[in-house]
Image (tube, rainbow, N blue to C red):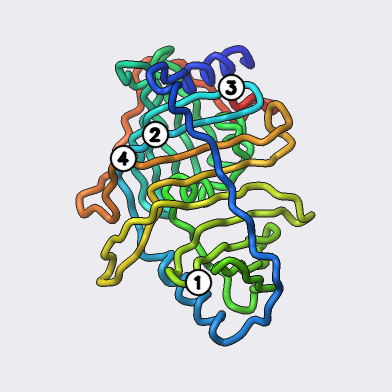
């Protein structure tokens, strides 16, 4: 079983031979260090950012994705479709000709991954354990979809803000969550969220994301700026190689809140089915 999944992961993250010369890596920004009072003005900024984060409800687009781990550097091309808090489908292509190699459907309660070259179907509950078995990313579904799309959900009220820091024109809000803490890096002038840092209940970093190259969209009659480039760093020591795992997502094109988006996923016929819920152990990302 372990060898089968290793083979799948190798196929899934097959090298984009033509793009090796311009391999992209994550760039992280410095976070503000000067602690300041949580004033009414900053509370208003937090409310504005929270409201803007909910304007994007769906996405249909194409993106290059670069992956870097302690053992591999890979690049794939993906069609990403998602309806926020519902379904997300990712069709992964690789190689010079851009052949599809994987078709994945993520639902809030389940996931389906079709290894198209070997006609294998991995199925299981959409839980952090299973996401880690497939992608090497121990994440809940909401965080995964936010990272891929550049949408950041902010459900926490003002009372959850524990501290505020400023520096370099940016504001950092440290917010208490059910699982630990969330730090939001906000550009004070543009009101764009430019970074997110997720920590667990022990204060250990789990995921750091940075957002760049914002472009405007009109959503619900309001101007909303969304990033074309998303940088993600994962720090989980359970990941293969016990080091940082990086992902850079750059959108070539996308439509936000498309009227006709209908995510359809057809289960493959005669595919060998692998039950992820029965697979024991942590598998390498690549």
- Identify which residue, 81 or 4, lies in the foreground: 81
On the image, the x and y values in percent for residue 167 come to 62, 68
Q: Earlier in the sequence, mark 4 or mark 3?
A: 3
Mark 2: give few (<14), some (14-19) or many (20+) Cα within 10 Å: some
Q: Is residue 160 left or right of residue 54?
A: right
Name the foreground residue: 85 vs 202: 202
Q: Indicate which disc, 4 or 2, sits on the residue closer to the N terminus.
A: 2
Residue at (45, 69) in percent of width and height: 191
Q: CA distance from mark 4 to mark 3?
A: 24 Å
Identify the residue position indicated by label 1 in the image. 188
Q: Residue 285 in the image: state x and y as whole percent.
A: 60, 27
The local crowd at label 3, few if under 14, some if 14 to 19, many if 20 or more residues have their Cα within 10 Å, is few
Locate residue 155, reporting x and y percent: 53, 67
Residue 64 appears left or right of 257? right
Q: Dot 2 corresponds to which residue? A: 64
Whether residues under marks 4 and 1 lie with C-beta atoms below 8 angstroms apart, the answer is no
User: In the image, which is nearer the foreground, mark 1 or mark 2?
Assistant: 1
Mark 4–mark 3 CB contact (< 8 Å): no
Q: Earlier in the sequence, mark 4 or mark 1?
A: 1
For image coordinates 53% across by 51% down, the residue present is 210
* SS label for mark 1: loop
Label at residue 252: 4
């Amino acid at each position: 079983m372990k060898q089968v999944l290793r083979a799948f992961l190798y196929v899934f993250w097959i090298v984009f031979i033509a793009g090796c010369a311009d391999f992209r890596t994550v760039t992280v920004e410095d976070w503000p260090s000067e602690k300041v009072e949580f004033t009414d003005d900053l509370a208003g900024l937090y409310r504005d950012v929270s409201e803007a984060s909910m304007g994007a409800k769906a996405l249909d687009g194409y993106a290059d994705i670069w992956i870097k781990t302690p053992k591999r550097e890979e690049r794939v091309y993906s069609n990403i479709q998602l309806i926020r808090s519902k379904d997300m489908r990712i069709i992964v292509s690789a190689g010079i000709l851009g052949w599809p190699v994987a078709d994945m459907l993520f639902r809030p309660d389940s996931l389906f991954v079709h290894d198209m070259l070997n006609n294998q179907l991995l199925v299981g509950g959409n839980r952090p354990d299973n996401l880690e078995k497939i992608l090497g990313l121990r994440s809940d579904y909401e965080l995964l979809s936010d990272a891929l799309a550049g949408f950041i959900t902010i459900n926490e009220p003002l009372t959850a803000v524990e501290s505020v820091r400023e520096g370099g024109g940016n504001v950092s809000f440290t917010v208490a969550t059910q699982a630990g803490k969330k730090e939001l890096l906000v550009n004070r002038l543009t009101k764009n969220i430019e970074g997110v840092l997720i920590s667990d209940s022990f204060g250990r970093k789990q995921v750091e994301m940075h957002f760049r190259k914002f472009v405007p969209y009109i959503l619900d009659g309001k101007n909303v700026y969304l990033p074309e480039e998303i940088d993600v760093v994962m720090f989980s020591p359970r990941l293969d190689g016990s080091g940082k795992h990086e992902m850079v997502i750059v959108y070539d094109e996308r439509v936000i809140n498309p009227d006709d988006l209908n995510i359809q996923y057809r289960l493959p016929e005669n595919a060998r089915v692998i039950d992820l819920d029965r697979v024991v152990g942590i598998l390498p990302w690549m």
